[in-house]
Image (spheres, rainbow, N blue to C red):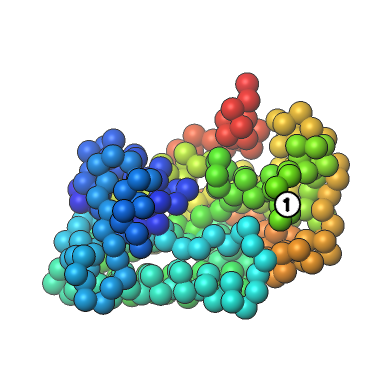
Amino acid sequence: MQIVVTGATGFIGKAVCSELILKGHTVVALTRDALKASLQLPQGVTPIEWGRADDKSGWKRSCTECDVVIHLAGESVGGQRWTPESQAKLMDSRIDTTRNIVDSFKTDTHPARLISASAVGYYGDTGDTEITESSPPGKDFLAGLAEIWEKEADRASLIGVKVVKIRIGIVLGVGGALSKLLYPLPIPISPWKIGLGGPLGSGRQWMPWIHHRDIVKLILWAVENEDASGVYNGTSPNPVRNSEFSRVLGRCLHRPAIFPIPAPVLRLIVGGFAEALLGGQKAIPQAALEAGFKFEFDNIQKALMDVLNKD
């Protein structure tokens, strides 16, 4: 198949491109800087610069003539203090890019499927309530962002494009969310490395995690499974509380996990992003499980041991 990928130079995007190439697909990566991307992308991926209205690079044509678009572009929500400016960038990087992708489709020429990333933050902070894909959206900033994001993707269905939305949780892998959890403060030293790691706030919040190989596998499954449609939670079947995650992480690192970062400290350092860290979702991937998808990693210790290369 001919497949277009946005966000191809990101943590998940590069792995997705590699798997697509291995499976024999033709892959075009839409990027802001084709030269820079060519140095980062797997061999065989063709980078094309996108965003220009005149389409001199041919990015719109690539979107209309391909079989599948995998839309993963978007600024990282972590690793920075939330300000009105940074929140606006988060909105623009997701909503505007999704709108541009969908606007490139034509009624008579369009891909069969649009696989669009979303976030499990769609549900807001749901406490101890178990949630599935049918649960309603939340009311906080990330929930509002995800809801608008998904509505932009859904517009593609009006011209006959099958839309798949994957609400991605905390992806565990080197260079992904795990790095931000190991370095939760804006300093180059991880508290875990010096034995000062521990839960965030009370530690009671649920963490909807997923191993990086499973999220890549789920995206590839959505590409190759023509019956895939609608919403899928990109999360492990077994979410854990932050306190349990911290205990397991400490055990894997052979470090204590008894020094929590108090909620007021988090709020002082990362602003509004603290609420996302202190809240969570007990999200279950019901749709994927019912469709027969098999997770390779459904145990948090096994997942962390693999990511950290521990025996």
Quadrant of res 57 = bottom left
Residue 236, above or below 146: above
Number of numbered labels in the structure image:
1
Q: Is residue 194 left or right of residue 5?
A: right
* Neighbourhood count class around disc 1 (C-alpha, 10 Å): few under 14, some 14–19, many 20 upward: few
Task: Give 219 or 82, whichever is nearer the viewer.
Answer: 82
Q: Position of residue 65 (x, y in %)?
A: 16, 61
Locate residue 59 relative to residue 213 in the image: left or right: left
Residue situated furthest left in the rendering = 108
Q: Position of residue 1 (x, y in %)?
A: 20, 48
Give the residue displayed 71% in from the left and 37% down from the top: 249
Residue in the image at 73% along x and 52% along y: 187
Residue 154 visible here: no
Element type at marker 1?
loop
- Relative placement, left or right, of 240 versus 257 is left
Task: Name the residue tied to disc 1.
Answer: 187
In the image as oriented, which residue stretches furthest toward the front? 35
Question: Which of the pair 16/128 is nearer the observer?
Answer: 16
Mark 1 residue type: Ile
Name the residue located 62 percent from the left edge and 78 percent from the top edge: 84
Give the residue drawn at x 53%, y 70%: 90
Q: Position of residue 258 (x, y in %)?
A: 86, 41
Left or right: residue 187 compared with residue 46: right
Is residue 294 in view? yes
Residue 134 higher or lower than 54, as above or below: above
The answer to which of 121 and 74 lies nearer the viewer is 74
What is the quadrant of the C terminus in the image? top right
Measured as percent of width and height from the top left, residue 56 is found at 19, 69
